[in-house]
Amino acid sequence: MPPPSPGRSVGPSVCVVGGGLAGLSAAITAADAGAVVTLLESRARLGGATFSFVRDGLSIDNGQHVFLRCCTAYRGFLDRLGVADRVWMQDRLSLPVVTPGGRIHHLSRGRGPAPLHLAGSLSRYPLLTAADKLAAARAVLGLRRIDPEDSRADDMSFGRWLRRTGQSERAIDALWGLLSIPTMNVAPDNASLGLAAMVFRTGLLQDSAAGDIGMPAVPLSQLHAEPARAVLDAAGADVRTSARVTAIERRDDRLLVRTHTGDVPADAVVVAVPHDDVAAILPEGAVADPTALRGLGASPIVNLHVIYDRRVTDQRFAVGHASPVQWVFDRSEVAGLSPGDGQYLAVSLSAAHSYLHLPVAALRERFLPALAELFPAARAAHLRSFLVTREPQATFRAAPGTARLRLGECTAVPGVLLAGSWTDTGWPATMEGAVRSGVRAARRALCVERVSQSREVDAAAADRPSMEGAMST
Ligand SMILES: Cc1cc2nc3c(=O)[nH]c(=O)nc-3n(C[C@H](O)[C@H](O)[C@H](O)COP(=O)(O)OP(=O)(O)OC[C@H]3O[C@@H](n4cnc5c(N)ncnc54)[C@H](O)[C@@H]3O)c2cc1C
């Protein structure tokens, strides 16, 4: 750790546990404010639930990640990392929905203000009847009236509410589920209405540009882990991988973070680990009932990485309808496949309980014909490879009654803060929620006693792109 520059006082020491997006954004926020930062990550790499690996010369992501224009904190994080040009974003929301036979219908936004920006496209959407469209308009008005923070909304199932507002099974399948399953990682019947209302209101119903879709243009590790490591190194932070934290203890007026490879004393600790790992390391009494966090459960995501010997579609991404294929992405360029050397499609399957334990051969048998139905050119293509990545605990289960289980950043032990996409950000388990929680916890960590001595520590921080300033939604 380099000594602080002459003329600068030393800020509080902040130890961040967990090197996912929550931990990385907490560490960078704290370092930017002049704190002395140590980051401890149990795995050999940073990035947490977002990472890539190389197989047969191609960069494979553990799972396709997508974000929306309304993800202001996440986009601010990318700005701070200096990688905002490593993502692709639509100028204007346009969701290609592809049906067996290869017909493509677009759900796109028009020029009007929200929510009217969707009206034209919905009125032309052939997968809904006229009655479905009227009912959808009623549901849009209904969602605008729901307070996502109302516990009664959180206790109700989104699917039940949709049926109560007259949505047919067809509309749930061709419209509501198609949008809510990938964002919440649960089927509408298993989803919290409060969280669904937050997603639809924030992404589609309040600001016409909010739902424009963005995605990485480079492998995930090049987007998050590597640049974050460079930023933290440049800030003088001590970043340790393969450093599993086993306990956090109070020692007089400081905290001691214990690992097998040495202990780290700190003024404040941001615990940014998955909810299932929190109970094992928090000091006693930090949260009322750490075992209650198990109630947040887990929902899996499975990705199928399908490489053909030729191009089978011109779509950058598409959503399957009347097909087991949910969302499918062309990853050829991102993965490093040479132009003219085939096509790499990733099929992302959310709420994937039924696929999680299926053998690769069974997934092939099910999904290759399904892809050939959606993209007829695949019928003549030869398969080069078929790889499956499975994330059993991709997100918490955004079920009814979840909100009361999510915790805020403060614990009963002064200086011990919580972060992670499972904390009570109001967002589902997303990159946006993770970054928001990390920034929020770091701000609190900076309020520990010694921070008053270090307010002027880093005037240059004001000139840097700020994740905090970006959290406008
Ligand atoms: C396949 C997949 C697809 C997804 N798709 C999307 C998407 O399209 N859009 C979107 O916004 N979100 C998506 N998500 C969700 C998003 O990736 C996560 O919500 C977010 O990255 C979680 O960040 P986090 O920092 O809260 O947790 P994590 O990324 O889980 O980080 C926690 C870290 O803590 C470490 N740790 C645990 N215990 C210890 C310990 N004792 N000591 C030290 N370190 C410890 C872990 O190793 C891990 O690195 C997806 C997730 C997956 C898995």
Image (cartoon, rainbow, N blue to C red):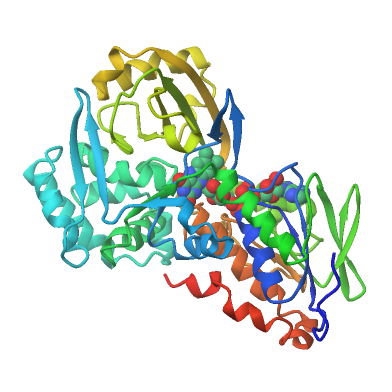
Residue 37, image x and y in percent?
77, 66
* Left or right: 175, with 41 as reference point: left
Q: Residue at x 45, y 65 (%)?
A: 72
93 vs 266, nearest the viewer: 93
1 is higher (above) or lower (below) than 353: below
Q: Residue at x 43, y 55 (%)?
A: 155
Q: Residue at x 75, y 87 (%)?
A: 452
Q: Residue at x 25, y 40 (%)?
A: 96
Q: Quadrant of the N terminus?
A: bottom right
Q: How many marks?
A: 0
354 is higher (above) or lower (below) than 450: above
238 is higher (above) or lower (below) than 293: below
Residue 455, image x and y in percent?
71, 86
* Left or right: 192, with 446 as reference point: left
Residue 347, image x and y in percent?
41, 30
269 vs 35, nearest the viewer: 35
* Left or right: 212, with 348 as reference point: left
The image quarter containing residue 307 is top left
The image quarter containing residue 77 is bottom right
Residue 331 visible to the viewer: no
116 is higher (above) or lower (below) than 100: below
Residue 459 visible to the viewer: yes
The image quarter containing residue 407 is bottom right
Q: Quadrant of the C terminus?
A: bottom left
Residue 123, image x and y in percent?
10, 49
296 vs 288, nearest the viewer: 296
* Left or right: 233, with 101 as reference point: right
